[in-house]
Amino acid sequence: MHLIIKASGEGAGQVSHLLAKNPNNLYDRTDKGVRVRMVYTKAEEQETEVLIHAEPDPVDLVRGTPDGYDITQYINDREFVTSSLFCSYIRSALGTALNGKPKEDYTQWVDHVFELELTFGPVASDLPDRMVEELFSALGYDVAMERGESAYSFDLKNRSTVRHITLRGNQTIQQALRQLFLLIPVLDNYKHYFISEDEIDKIKRYGEGWLDTHPLKELIVRRTLHFAELIRTYERKHGTLTFEDAGTAQAGVADGNREKRLNSESETLGHDGAGEDKVSDTKADTDTDTGALSPDTAPVRLNELRYRAITDIVASLPNKRRIVDMGAGEGKLSARLAYIPGVEMIAAVEPSGQSRLRAKERFARLQDRAGVKAVPEVMLGSLFYFDEQMQHMDVMILCEVIEHVEEYRLDRIMDTILNEYRPEVLLVTTPNKKYNEVYEMEQEQLRHQDHRFEWTREQFSIRCAQWAQKGDYAYEISGIGEHKEGFGQPTQLVKFSRRKEEQA
């Protein structure tokens, strides 16, 4: 992970004083397992170039974390990519420049606009190239991005999702660094630390003078704060957020990476909550999409619309006493189902130990709530293992789960559900691949890095017909989210109903 700052033109030689680092001295510090170095590759009056490099200890990155015992936690990109971690590593080295407080003799240069070239990377981002470019071009930068070619010997993909970014424009050193310190974590959409109201102060501090007029302010704030409660706090202090460009913003809004969150308790529980994407059977993160986003109305997250659609269907069913929420994650959907009259038992099935623990805490707070009909029960389970406890339920739900399973395994899974578990009703939701074009995503890009596939409406319809026929079920396909002519809706939903003669 690195950042290269190149300044040209009048006063470029003063940049070293703004950074408070002597070009003739090597800056090399190691703190808490992270080595940070600053090297001037050029230090002349008309041109200064400095390389800032950080090298963390990959073991220290996960030591002491909740999942530190899990060997898979050591397989990640955190030691390589430029993220919030990188910003935290180099903040002390660039503190003088960020604060705009060099030695008195050089304060006049704090507000001096330099010809800058900023190069940083690699960046692992779920945002499409167009949106990455818009984040910086709105600030007056010319943006160039490079991707490496993937030299795989098998057919996976030929372009890396990792990008190296170069910005060229006229800006002060202080403002350029503040923009990077706010926008680099937005690109990566990951925070390695507890997210609190301090983040709101950081937005105000680093965003001063440019964020309020940025066309993607909504995206920046939401991906910085992650949690609904913090976003509401920000809005109370600074005014309601609105989409300047709904079609652009919806493709990139993702309120956090669940597998990496440290502050899930700031989210609201149950039927009053702001819906988040569930953790799937494979511990998936949230999808990068939202729902109905009319410029004239407040945006509603797509996952909220999913929950509403599912709970509405369940509420309308004549038989709904026993429900299985398969891949329940932290139990947000299960908590909503708990309020439906006629429900007597909800099994929140989830393989992840950490997610089950959070679900238990969530359900414990439902015990004394008015209107709760049945407190969900957390169960260890997986789509890949048969469990006789789940046989002959009234309703089984797979909300945003199947796309996290290898496609070749789905037929066997659906055979188990429809021919062995035999629920009276099965509800399944999954992304509509065609709708990714509305989000202006690249052709090969999936809505989340853990998705194994995404189907078009035609592909989904074909598979549903095959499954229904083999299981002797009737089925009905519908959509969730804003409809676009020629593209359909962002989420597909199928309702499988056991045939009446079978039920008799």
Image (cartoon, helix red, strand yellow):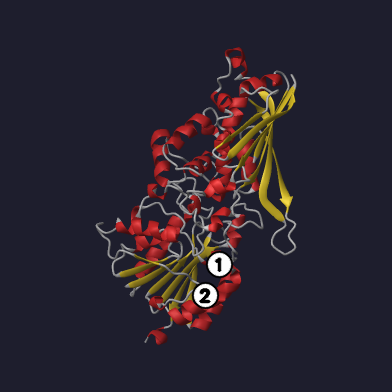
For the residue pair 416 and 262, the one nearer the viewer reads as: 262
Query: Residue 386 placed where, x, y %?
Result: 46, 77
Under circle 1, the secondary element is loop
Say which residue label 1 marks. 405
Amino acid at pointer 1: Val
Identify the residue at image location x=62%, y=21%. 18
Q: Is 474 placed above or below 438 here?
A: below
Crowding near pointer 1: few (<14 within 10 Å), some, many (20+)? some
Q: Is 27 placed above or below 86 here?
A: above
Query: Residue 488 placed where, x, y %?
Result: 55, 62
Q: Quadrant of the C terminus?
A: bottom left
Query: In the rendered image, which quarter is residue 84 located in?
Result: top right
Query: In the rendered image, which quarter is residue 169 located in?
Result: top right
For the residue pair 192 and 67, the one nearer the viewer reads as: 67
Residue 331 visible: no
Say which residue label 2 marks. 413
Under circle 2, the secondary element is helix
Asked if the residue under mark 2 is in contact with the one under mark 1, i.e. CB atoms within 8 Å, the reply is: yes
| Residue 70: numbered disc | none
In space, the residues marked 1 and 2 are separated at their CA atoms by 10 Å
Residue 41 placement, left or right of 305? right
